[in-house]
Image (tube, rainbow, N blue to C red):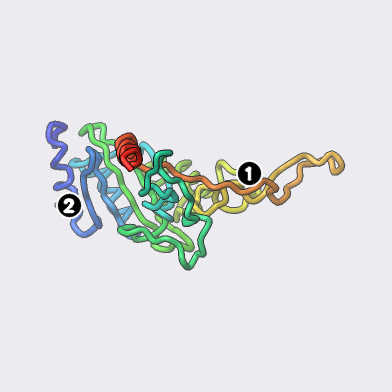
Amino acid sequence: MTPEAPASLIEQLKAHFGEAIESAREALGQYTIEVSPDRLLEVAKSLRDERTFRFQQLIDLCGVDYLGYGQDEWETDAVTDEGFSRGVTGLGPGRFAWDNRPRPAGIPNRYAVVVHLLSIEHNLRLRLRCFAADDALPVVPSLVEIWGAANWFEREAFDLFGIVFEGHPDLRRILTDYGFVGHPFRKDFPLTGNVEVRYDPDKGRVVYEPVSIEPRVGVPRVVREDSRWLQAQNEAAGKAN
């Protein structure tokens, strides 16, 4: 395989792994394959060792929470002479009953691990995604034995998303404080947190208390058509009437 023909990577991946990979695709110049947890180690070892691929370097590993994926809280369909409407519908993560939670189309499970690999020999990059089978207790195999650089990345994903990496040699929190409860990058974790910390001069120590600030709503940006033309049409129609 040569760097002059990277488009053939998808075909080679499909031919080599067959049913071991659930999908392989190219979009916007990025190659992505999806693997189930029970085949992850097998595929990862081949990606590292097979001369056709030689993805010997792990660039990044992160967790992803797909809760509410593809949904937003902006009412952006209507436009007035003052701009787009911006009402919050209250359907975002953290503001719905768990049994009625949004279920994105095309996303099989809530949590996934995404790995970015580099083949220096072939000058290629590959994105490897693996969905955890159980949303209540997301577990995927650890990649530390294949790429040692995965060690701290997996600890970070465990700390922030609560994804358990089976076989990790030292899986413990790496960013949050001692005794921290919850996983702050989960979509349903409150933006204000659950506790606040202050120094109590009477007790002579730091104390933890329930958070006292008002919860706030984080509304994501939404990609939409250029508002200048829609607003101009609306204003012109208003003047005509």
Expressed as whole percent of the image width and height from the top left, the position of residue 52 reads: 18, 42
Q: Residue 139, image x and y in percent?
A: 44, 58
Going by the numbered disc 1, the residue's amino acid type is Asp
Residue drawn at x 69%, y 45% as measured from the top left: 196
Residue 48 versus residue 153: which sits nearer the camera?
153
- Is label 2 in contact with label 1 (beta carbons under 8 Å)? no
Residue 188 at x, y percent in the picture: 52, 54
Frontmost residue, 214 versus 65 = 214
Mark 1 secondary-structure assignment: loop
| Amino acid at dot 2 | Lys
Q: Residue at x 43, y 46 (%)?
A: 85
**Does 137 appear above or below 172?**
below
Gap in Å between the C-alphas at discs 2 and 1? 44 Å
Q: Is residue 69 visible?
A: yes
- How packed mark 2 is, by other alpha carbons closer than 10 Å (few <14, some 14-19, many 20 or more), is some
Instruction: Point out which mark residue 177 bears.
Output: 1
Front-lying residue, 122 or 192: 192
Residue in front for this viewpoint, 189 or 125: 189
Q: Residue 14 — which label?
A: 2
Label 1: few (<14), some (14–19) or many (≥20) C-alpha neighbours in 10 Å: few
Quadrant location of residue 131? bottom left
| Direction from residue 33 to residue 165 in the image, left or right | right
